[in-house]
Image (cartoon, coloured by chain):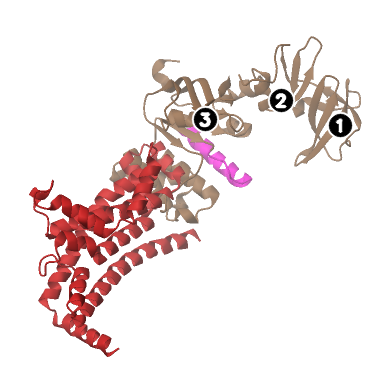
Chain colours: A red, B brown
Amino acid sequence: MQFILDGLRGAFDLLVAGDPRILGVLGVTLTVALWSTLFALVAGLPIGLWLGLGRFAGRRLGLATANAGLGLPPVVVGLVVSLFLFRGAPLGFLSLIYTVEGMIVAQTVLSLPIVAALTAAAVQGVEPALLRQARALGASRVRVAALALREARVGVLAATIGALGSALSEVGALVLVGGNIEGQTQTLATAVLVRVSAGEYAQAIALGALLLALVFLIAAALTVAQQGEAKWQATRAS
Amino acid sequence: MAGDARVLTAHGLGADRGGRAVLDAVDLELRRGEVVALLGPNGAGKSTLVGLLAGLEAPDRGSVERSGRVAAVLQAPALARRTALANVEAGLAWWGVPRRERRRRALRALETVGAGELAGRHARALSGGEARRVHLARSLAVEPDALLLDEPFAGLDVGSRADLLYDAASVLRTERRTTLVVVHDRAEAWALADRVVVMLEGRLAAEGSPQEVFERPPTPAVAAFVGFVGRLREPGGVLWMLRPADVQLTTDGPIEGRVVRQVPLEEGLRLELDVPHGRLVTIVGVPGPAIGELVRVRVEGGVRFDSAATLEGGA
């Protein structure tokens, strides 16, 4: 018990002191999480709309693939991305291995199915008659898609929360692609791994606490937005 | 009619669902400024026709020519999770109306259908009748060259239905908007339309002014649909079809019949009578004759069809 209390005390000191190394790790964590989520949204929302609203052969297979992507083993994704990014590999010329940019690529691969699958599920719940009515009033495909996203915004926010949460807490894929290099490619989650291995529990607990706080803050902000919207809808409906 | 007066023309339109033709060989014109009522029983293909005319689906056969833009008000009053005003503005945005014009036009359209006070109300807080009004306003606001209304009064209670019918009739008739409106009953067609089209079993079965179609239906099937529910087979095989109003109970009537069914209605008692060579329907005051009682009737009016005519077949 004492051991945990010491760790928490050390964590508090580290956080209050504003250790530049920790701030650096925080910066890498946020960079990877925000950029990968952004890329996953840019690519995943159209894919989710296509899978959720499209009428084409193979749609069910596409949905099944997106849903299966929710369970992608991060270590395997990290391995595959690394195999493409190593020097001499097909994408080696991009020099992305052991860089933050490479980590963003790996994390985007992990976040993409989260956004696509949850968006597809959300837009499938939108009243088909509304989308058909929009088309009957001349709405373009882009406008119909925008309407579907707007109507399914509570579900789309859930997809965003999922993607961000995954990125903030990812370890396996980011260690393999980023190399977990202190001061360069280390994130809060991968740094915890190193500190625990080195027996530096105070630092591990400090980093873990910071990571939890970050996940909670971002998820809370998005949840407030999401539930505020849901509550507003419910209030208006009653 | 000059060619340039046609806003919408369907040539030999056909559509299949599940390997079955639900629409076949439909030729239809919609001329500028006219209001056409499309009538037919459930499953006649009316909504399918609206979808094809609006361009929501491609026909399996035939083609549609449009000289101008066509907007459709579909049967379900589906509104987005926004206020009534925002819904109408969204319709204008879909149509491509510049943002600066949307507010003014949306408010005007809501006023036109008697829903001005609903502008700030959220869609989920609207009653069925109010949602229908907003639904209608959303399409009136875009001011299309042709407007297709698919059962705009469906699912409303009698009072709301009548109110919306009078408002819609006023707008469509006053502003001479080119409109095809799918309706379920003759009263709505009378109130709204210059011309009536009857669809039966996926085909156009009758077309003309309301008076022509309702007073002189061209086939027994159309006659039955527009209310000529009594029928007598006369010597020589002529089929005489009669409305309840054409059949009068009277002690010195030339036809004797037996009451086989009676249904109480708001306006009296609906009687079905078995008579030699047919069955008649009439409405009498209460208390009327009992089931099994013999009565005498006089018949006048109705429509006659030659011996080859049958009730089978839509066209």
Say what secondary structure mark 1 lies in. strand
Between A156 and B211, the one lying in front of the other is A156
In the image, residue B139 lies at what x, y percent?
43, 39
Q: CA distance from mark 1 to mark 2?
A: 18 Å
Give the residue drawn at x 23%, y 84%. Answer: A7
Q: Which residues are magenta?
A: B152-175
Q: Which chain is home to disc 2?
A: B
Quarter holding residue A104: bottom left
Q: Earlier in the sequence, mark 3 or mark 2?
A: 3
| Label 3 packing within 10 angstroms: few (<14), some (14-19), many (20+) | few
Q: Residues within 10 Å of mark 1 (few under 14, many from 20)?
A: many
Q: What is the number of the mark on residue B32?
A: none
What residue is pinned by disc 1?
A: B259
Q: Main secondary structure of the magenta part?
A: helix
x, y percent for residue B217: 65, 20
Q: Position of residue B164 (x, y in %)?
A: 55, 42
Judging from the image, mark 3 belongs to the subunit labelled B
Nearer to us: label 3 or label 2: 3
Which badge, 1 or 3, comes first in the chain's sequence?
Answer: 3
**Which labelled disc corresponds to residue B228?**
2
Depth check: give the residue in front, B85 or B167: B85
Residue picked out by circle 3: B18
Amino acid tagged 3: Gly
Q: Are marks 1 and 3 in contact (CB under 8 Å)?
A: no
Q: Whole-percent x and y of residue B221?
A: 66, 22
Give the quarter of the figure containing the N terminus of chain A. bottom left
Residue B157 included in the magenta stretch of the image? yes
Amino acid type of the residue that numbered disc 2 sits on in the rendered structure: Phe
Direction from residue B182 to residue A153 in the image, left or right: left
- Depth check, mark 1 against mark 3: the one in front is 3
Residue B90 at least partly seen: no
